[in-house]
Image: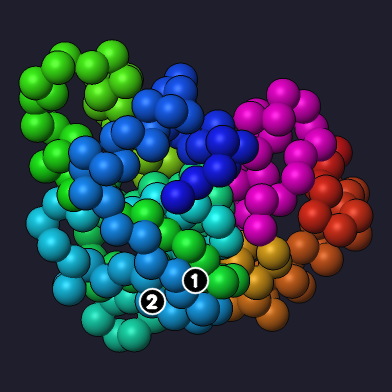
Amino acid sequence: MMTQRELEMSPLFQDIRYEDYRRMMGCFKTVQKSFRPDDVAWDLSAAGSGELGVIERGRAALIRMDEDGVTTVLEDLESGGVFGLPIAEPGGDSLEVVCRTACDVLFIDYSHILKRCERACVHHSLLVRNMLELMSGKALALAERVDVLSRRSIREKLLCYFRQLAKKAGGDTFTLPFSLSTLADYIAADRSAMMRELKRLREEGILRSEGRQFTLC
Protein backbone atom coordinates (compact mmCIF):
# COMPACT_ATOMS: atom_id res chain seq x y z
CA MET A 1 0.00 0.00 0.00
CA MET A 2 1.22 3.53 -0.75
CA THR A 3 2.60 5.79 1.92
CA GLN A 4 0.91 9.15 2.40
CA ARG A 5 3.69 10.90 0.48
CA GLU A 6 3.39 8.46 -2.43
CA LEU A 7 -0.37 8.92 -2.43
CA GLU A 8 0.03 12.68 -2.78
CA MET A 9 2.17 12.11 -5.90
CA SER A 10 -0.45 9.98 -7.65
CA PRO A 11 -2.81 11.84 -10.01
CA LEU A 12 -5.36 9.05 -9.63
CA PHE A 13 -5.76 9.78 -5.90
CA GLN A 14 -5.51 13.56 -6.03
CA ASP A 15 -7.44 15.32 -3.21
CA ILE A 16 -8.26 11.99 -1.53
CA ARG A 17 -7.33 11.71 2.14
CA TYR A 18 -5.03 8.90 3.19
CA GLU A 19 -7.59 7.31 5.53
CA ASP A 20 -10.16 7.32 2.69
CA TYR A 21 -7.57 5.78 0.35
CA ARG A 22 -6.95 2.93 2.79
CA ARG A 23 -10.69 2.31 3.07
CA MET A 24 -11.09 2.29 -0.73
CA MET A 25 -8.32 -0.24 -1.22
CA GLY A 26 -10.27 -2.81 0.78
CA CYS A 27 -13.53 -1.92 -0.95
CA PHE A 28 -11.98 -2.24 -4.42
CA LYS A 29 -10.28 -5.57 -3.60
CA THR A 30 -6.94 -4.32 -4.86
CA VAL A 31 -3.91 -6.55 -5.40
CA GLN A 32 -0.31 -5.47 -4.88
CA LYS A 33 2.51 -7.12 -6.81
CA SER A 34 6.28 -6.63 -6.75
CA PHE A 35 8.50 -6.84 -9.83
CA ARG A 36 12.22 -6.90 -10.55
CA PRO A 37 14.02 -4.74 -13.15
CA ASP A 38 13.12 -5.79 -16.74
CA ASP A 39 10.04 -7.72 -15.56
CA VAL A 40 6.85 -7.25 -17.58
CA ALA A 41 4.34 -5.84 -15.09
CA TRP A 42 1.46 -5.70 -17.58
CA ASP A 43 0.81 -7.14 -21.04
CA LEU A 44 -2.15 -5.97 -23.13
CA SER A 45 -2.58 -9.39 -24.73
CA ALA A 46 -2.89 -11.06 -21.32
CA ALA A 47 -4.63 -8.27 -19.40
CA GLY A 48 -8.17 -8.41 -18.15
CA SER A 49 -10.77 -6.13 -19.69
CA GLY A 50 -10.70 -3.61 -16.87
CA GLU A 51 -7.43 -3.77 -14.97
CA LEU A 52 -5.77 -0.55 -13.85
CA GLY A 53 -2.22 -0.49 -12.52
CA VAL A 54 -0.73 2.20 -10.29
CA ILE A 55 3.04 2.44 -9.80
CA GLU A 56 3.44 2.71 -6.04
CA ARG A 57 7.23 2.91 -6.14
CA GLY A 58 9.85 2.42 -8.85
CA ARG A 59 10.04 3.32 -12.53
CA ALA A 60 8.61 1.55 -15.57
CA ALA A 61 7.86 2.24 -19.23
CA LEU A 62 4.83 1.63 -21.45
CA ILE A 63 6.26 0.05 -24.60
CA ARG A 64 4.68 -0.73 -27.95
CA MET A 65 6.07 -3.33 -30.33
CA ASP A 66 5.02 -3.29 -33.97
CA GLU A 67 4.69 -6.26 -36.31
CA ASP A 68 8.38 -5.99 -37.26
CA GLY A 69 9.52 -6.19 -33.65
CA VAL A 70 10.47 -2.50 -33.44
CA THR A 71 9.85 -1.14 -29.95
CA THR A 72 8.71 2.38 -29.11
CA VAL A 73 8.50 3.90 -25.64
CA LEU A 74 5.06 5.49 -25.36
CA GLU A 75 5.30 6.69 -21.79
CA ASP A 76 7.67 6.66 -18.82
CA LEU A 77 5.94 5.79 -15.57
CA GLU A 78 7.16 6.80 -12.13
CA SER A 79 5.60 6.65 -8.67
CA GLY A 80 1.91 7.52 -9.05
CA GLY A 81 1.86 6.65 -12.76
CA VAL A 82 -1.23 4.82 -14.03
CA PHE A 83 -1.61 2.30 -16.87
CA GLY A 84 -4.14 -0.23 -18.10
CA LEU A 85 -6.58 -1.06 -20.86
CA PRO A 86 -9.18 1.63 -20.03
CA ILE A 87 -6.57 4.36 -20.64
CA ALA A 88 -4.25 2.54 -23.06
CA GLU A 89 -3.09 4.44 -26.12
CA PRO A 90 -4.80 3.25 -29.29
CA GLY A 91 -2.91 1.66 -32.13
CA GLY A 92 -0.81 -1.44 -32.20
CA ASP A 93 -1.72 -4.78 -30.72
CA SER A 94 1.35 -5.23 -28.50
CA LEU A 95 1.61 -3.05 -25.41
CA GLU A 96 3.66 -3.88 -22.34
CA VAL A 97 4.69 -2.15 -19.13
CA VAL A 98 8.33 -3.06 -18.49
CA CYS A 99 9.98 -2.25 -15.17
CA ARG A 100 13.09 -0.05 -15.38
CA THR A 101 13.78 -0.62 -11.69
CA ALA A 102 12.28 -2.81 -8.99
CA CYS A 103 8.61 -1.85 -8.79
CA ASP A 104 5.64 -2.24 -6.48
CA VAL A 105 2.39 -2.04 -8.44
CA LEU A 106 -1.19 -1.77 -7.20
CA PHE A 107 -3.82 -3.37 -9.47
CA ILE A 108 -7.45 -2.21 -9.31
CA ASP A 109 -10.46 -3.71 -11.05
CA TYR A 110 -11.78 -0.85 -13.21
CA SER A 111 -15.40 -1.97 -12.70
CA HIS A 112 -15.08 -1.16 -8.99
CA ILE A 113 -14.19 2.42 -9.85
CA LEU A 114 -17.18 2.87 -12.15
CA LYS A 115 -19.66 1.02 -9.93
CA ARG A 116 -22.00 3.38 -8.11
CA CYS A 117 -21.01 3.70 -4.48
CA GLU A 118 -23.91 2.78 -2.21
CA ARG A 119 -22.80 5.39 0.33
CA ALA A 120 -22.27 8.08 -2.33
CA CYS A 121 -18.79 8.64 -0.87
CA VAL A 122 -17.14 11.92 -1.82
CA HIS A 123 -13.76 10.23 -2.26
CA HIS A 124 -15.29 7.77 -4.74
CA SER A 125 -16.59 10.69 -6.83
CA LEU A 126 -13.14 12.30 -6.63
CA LEU A 127 -11.57 9.09 -7.92
CA VAL A 128 -13.92 9.05 -10.94
CA ARG A 129 -13.11 12.72 -11.60
CA ASN A 130 -9.38 12.00 -11.43
CA MET A 131 -9.84 9.05 -13.76
CA LEU A 132 -11.53 11.24 -16.38
CA GLU A 133 -8.79 13.86 -16.07
CA LEU A 134 -6.15 11.16 -16.53
CA MET A 135 -7.83 9.96 -19.71
CA SER A 136 -7.97 13.54 -20.99
CA GLY A 137 -4.31 14.07 -20.14
CA LYS A 138 -3.24 10.90 -21.90
CA ALA A 139 -5.19 11.94 -24.99
CA LEU A 140 -3.26 15.23 -24.99
CA ALA A 141 0.06 13.40 -24.50
CA LEU A 142 -0.79 11.14 -27.42
CA ALA A 143 -1.52 14.17 -29.63
CA GLU A 144 1.86 15.66 -28.69
CA ARG A 145 3.58 12.38 -29.47
CA VAL A 146 1.90 12.16 -32.86
CA ASP A 147 3.06 15.72 -33.59
CA VAL A 148 6.67 14.67 -32.89
CA LEU A 149 6.54 11.40 -34.82
CA SER A 150 4.89 13.06 -37.84
CA ARG A 151 8.05 15.13 -38.47
CA ARG A 152 10.16 13.75 -41.30
CA SER A 153 13.70 14.13 -39.99
CA ILE A 154 15.40 13.42 -36.67
CA ARG A 155 16.28 17.11 -36.43
CA GLU A 156 12.65 18.15 -36.85
CA LYS A 157 11.51 15.54 -34.31
CA LEU A 158 14.04 16.73 -31.74
CA LEU A 159 13.18 20.40 -32.16
CA CYS A 160 9.46 19.70 -32.07
CA TYR A 161 9.78 17.77 -28.81
CA PHE A 162 12.18 20.32 -27.28
CA ARG A 163 9.74 23.13 -28.07
CA GLN A 164 6.99 21.18 -26.33
CA LEU A 165 9.17 20.80 -23.22
CA ALA A 166 10.22 24.46 -23.30
CA LYS A 167 6.59 25.57 -23.53
CA LYS A 168 5.68 23.45 -20.49
CA ALA A 169 8.70 24.83 -18.61
CA GLY A 170 7.65 28.39 -19.43
CA GLY A 171 11.01 29.34 -20.93
CA ASP A 172 13.82 28.26 -23.21
CA THR A 173 15.46 26.04 -20.59
CA PHE A 174 13.98 22.68 -19.67
CA THR A 175 14.98 19.32 -18.21
CA LEU A 176 14.76 16.17 -20.27
CA PRO A 177 12.43 13.80 -18.37
CA PHE A 178 14.41 10.69 -19.30
CA SER A 179 17.76 9.47 -20.61
CA LEU A 180 19.07 10.06 -24.13
CA SER A 181 18.58 6.37 -24.92
CA THR A 182 14.94 6.68 -23.98
CA LEU A 183 14.71 9.91 -25.98
CA ALA A 184 15.80 7.98 -29.08
CA ASP A 185 13.04 5.46 -28.42
CA TYR A 186 10.54 8.26 -27.82
CA ILE A 187 11.19 9.91 -31.18
CA ALA A 188 11.60 6.51 -32.92
CA ALA A 189 15.14 7.20 -34.09
CA ASP A 190 18.48 5.40 -34.12
CA ARG A 191 20.42 6.53 -31.05
CA SER A 192 23.71 7.11 -32.90
CA ALA A 193 22.00 9.17 -35.60
CA MET A 194 20.16 11.16 -32.94
CA MET A 195 23.41 11.88 -31.06
CA ARG A 196 25.00 13.17 -34.27
CA GLU A 197 22.04 15.49 -34.81
CA LEU A 198 22.23 16.76 -31.24
CA LYS A 199 25.92 17.53 -31.80
CA ARG A 200 25.07 19.51 -34.97
CA LEU A 201 22.40 21.50 -33.12
CA ARG A 202 24.95 22.43 -30.46
CA GLU A 203 27.62 23.35 -33.04
CA GLU A 204 25.12 25.55 -34.89
CA GLY A 205 24.25 27.37 -31.68
CA ILE A 206 20.64 26.24 -31.74
CA LEU A 207 20.94 24.17 -28.59
CA ARG A 208 22.93 24.14 -25.35
CA SER A 209 22.95 21.28 -22.90
CA GLU A 210 24.49 20.19 -19.64
CA GLY A 211 23.48 16.73 -18.48
CA ARG A 212 19.72 16.49 -18.91
CA GLN A 213 19.22 20.25 -18.90
CA PHE A 214 18.74 21.81 -22.34
CA THR A 215 18.32 25.36 -23.60
CA LEU A 216 16.95 26.40 -26.98
CA CYS A 217 18.93 29.41 -28.24
Q: Which numbered disc flags the more N-terminal residue, 1 or 2? A: 2
Q: Residue at x 86, y 58 (%)?
A: 211
For the residue labelled by badge 1, is the local secondary structure a helix, a strand or a loop? strand
Q: Quadrant of residue 132?
A: top left
Q: In which quarter of the image is the C terminus?
A: top right
Q: Mark 2 points at which residue?
A: 40
Q: Does the magenta segment cover residue 176?
A: yes
Q: What stretch is highlighted in magenta?
A: 154-178
Can you tell which mark lies on residue 28?
none
Asked if the residue under mark 2 is in contact with the one under mark 1, i.e. CB atoms within 8 Å, the reply is yes
Residue 201 is left or right of residue 26, and the answer is: right
**Residue at 9%, 32% in the rendered image:** 115
Residue type marked 1: Cys
In the image, residue 95 lies at what x, y percent? Answer: 29, 68
For residue 110, say whether it is visible.
yes
Q: Could you tell me which residue is drawn at 46 percent across and 23 percent down? A: 17
For the residue labelled by badge 2, is the local secondary structure a helix, a strand or a loop? strand
Task: Using the image, tell me which numbered label, if any, was put on residue 99.
Answer: 1
Q: Of the residues shown, which amino acid type is indicated by label 2?
A: Val
Q: Position of residue 172 (x, y in %)?
A: 79, 32
Distance CA(mark 1)–CA(mark 2): 6 Å
Q: Nearer the viewer, residue 179 or 126?
A: 126
What x and y, as percent, mark residue 165? 65, 39
Left-right relation of 121 to 150: left
